[in-house]
Image (spheres, grey):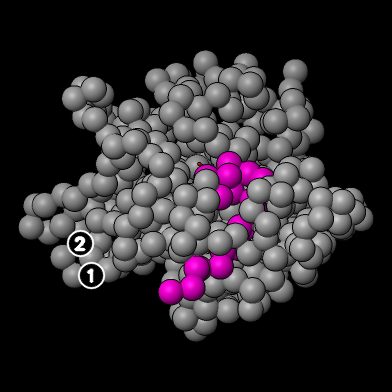
Amino acid sequence: MAAQRVAVLGATGSIGGSALDVVARHPDRLRASVLAAGSRVDALLALCRIHRPDHAVIADPAGYAALAAGLRDAGLPTRAHAGDEALCALAGGEDCDTVVAAIVGAAGLASTLAAARAGKRLLLANKESLVMAGALLMAEAARGGARILPIDSEHNALFQCLPGGRVADGVRRLVLTASGGPFRGRRREQMAAITPEQAIAHPKWSMGPKISVDSATLMNKGLEVIEAHHLFGLGNERIGVVVHPQSLVHALVEYVDGSTLAQLGLPDMRTALALGFAWPERIASGVAPLDLVEHGRLDFEPPDLEAFACLRLARQALEAGGTAPAALNAANEVAVSAFLQGRIGFLGIPAIVESTLATLPATDAGSLEAVREVDAQARRHATLALSRHAAA
Ligand code: NAD
Ligand code: MG
């Protein structure tokens, strides 16, 4: 059997690095054929020297000359490309069988859709594309014959606890676990002075800065409820969230007969990625087995929706439907970026998201144009709202 040719979009990120680690463990069955990154040419070149892909793409066109020169100087056969169009053409093109969609944020939507349309095995980490345009993305995947393997620990766990990875009769409820992030147990008023350094220091997972802040506000869990809705087809009321600080149980499926199935493992995304590459088979991921005796205990508690308004706002957007989740996502991206730059305080994030949702009515999300338009409107509104929440 020829090796699966893998495109890693977001190769220089946290998920990208974990994906390439798994790929390198299985040279007989996996080969990185396309590597793509946003703007860090040096980091992309370093990966090209190790993995020798057929193609390398830098999304920022300003990086093209340096990428091309770097590949030439290293004597690599890798072809250089730049820009979003090249990225989408390669994601949906003939030179890969599998796409790891691991770009962060709305920037990942177009290439994820291209991979879905082209019927790739799609290892989907870019949850924002499902939040923005879940119905469109699932429809494109069905039409194109793409198999979506969820690369979010909770959704990967649900996939593993559902026969064939799908919800059928007999499923009562899905339950996502949340670590609670670094500020679990704090009241709202105790969170005003939180700094970006404190927010990105996640207690259990090592991740990129945006998702780390999302985990600290619990927006990440809210995005994941919407993600689960699209992946598994259940409504808001049938997707529960429970806080589990040890991050060893990743999700649970409740069945009508009283059975609850859970998936457990150490908090390391290589488990989900290995499953995505090999499913329905299993391959080694480099993750150590879970020793429950060593860990000793598993705790569970309800999320505090007063203190962590973002989870409540995401559920509200899911209930509103249409373009509301796209507006939520865009406002959150603007607010998180401003928080990371020290321009607004931690509590400015839910405030900006709430004000954006209140301003933009949910409309039909049936076309990509409609989604893009709402994304742009929400970014404009959130940007204007920033000044009202400027950090003291
Ligand atoms: P990261 O910040 O570590 O990496 C992001 C990657 O995206 C980088 O390679 C960057 O070059 C690329 N990128 C950024 N902007 C781009 C653009 N405009 N065009 C092309 N590429 C661009 O982020 P991450 O933690 O690896 O997360 C990636 C995605 O996976 C996110 O959607 C996140 O929610 C999801 N996810 C991550 C984890 C995790 O453990 N890190 C877990 C579950 C889901
Ligand atoms: Mg997750």
Label pair 1/2, CB-CB below 8 angstroms:
yes
Indicate the position of residue 280 as horizontal and vertical percent values. Answer: 32, 66
Quadrant, the N terminus: bottom left
Left or right, 139 with reference to 163: right
Residue 14 covered by magenta stretch: yes
C-alpha span from label 1 to label 2: 6 Å
| Residues shaded magenta | 1-20
Left or right, 284 with reference to 201: left
Question: Which residue occupies the foreground of this view, 224 or 124?
Answer: 124
Given the image, on which type of amino acid does mark 1 rest? Ala
Residue 355 numbered mark, or none? none
Question: Which residue occupies the foreground of this view, 285 or 324?
Answer: 285
Q: Residue at x 57, y 78 (%)?
A: 117
Rendered view: 296 above or below 44 = above
Left or right, 258 with reference to 318: left
Provide the residue designation for mark 2. 171
SS category of the residue bearing label 1? loop
